[in-house]
Amino acid sequence: MPAPMTPQDVAARRRGVLRTAWALAAIALLIFVVFIASGVLGK
């Protein structure tokens, strides 16, 4: 059984998860903007 996490471990993991979530959101937004721009500029 793994050792219980300290509050510092929990905070570090939460920061890592939030950073990953923001990075994925930024990539998704970039793909969305490129898709919309290609539709608008491609005509």
Image: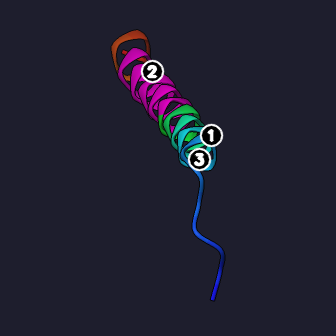
| Residue found 50% across the figure and 23% down from its top | 30
Residue 24 in picture, x, y percent from top left: 52, 38
Dot 2 amino acid type? Ser
Circle 1 is placed at which residue position? 12
Name the residue carrying label 3: 13
- Determine whether the residue tagged by mark 1 lies in a helix, strand or loop: helix
Q: Is residue 8 above or below residue 43?
A: below
Q: How far apart in space, not on screen, are marks 2 and 3 (Cα)?
A: 37 Å
User: Residue beneath label 2, please?
Assistant: 38
Check disc 3 and report its element: helix, strand or loop: helix
Q: Residue at x 58, y 68 (%)?
A: 4
Mark 1 Cα shell of 10 Å, populated few (<14), some (14-19), many (≥20): few
Q: Which amino acid type is shown beneath numbered disc 1? A: Ala
- Give the Cα distance between marks 1 and 2: 39 Å
Q: Which residues are magenta?
A: 22-38
- Is 14 left, or right, of 12 in this rendering? left
The residue that appears at 41% across and 15% down in the rendered structure is 37
Residue 11, image quadrant: top right
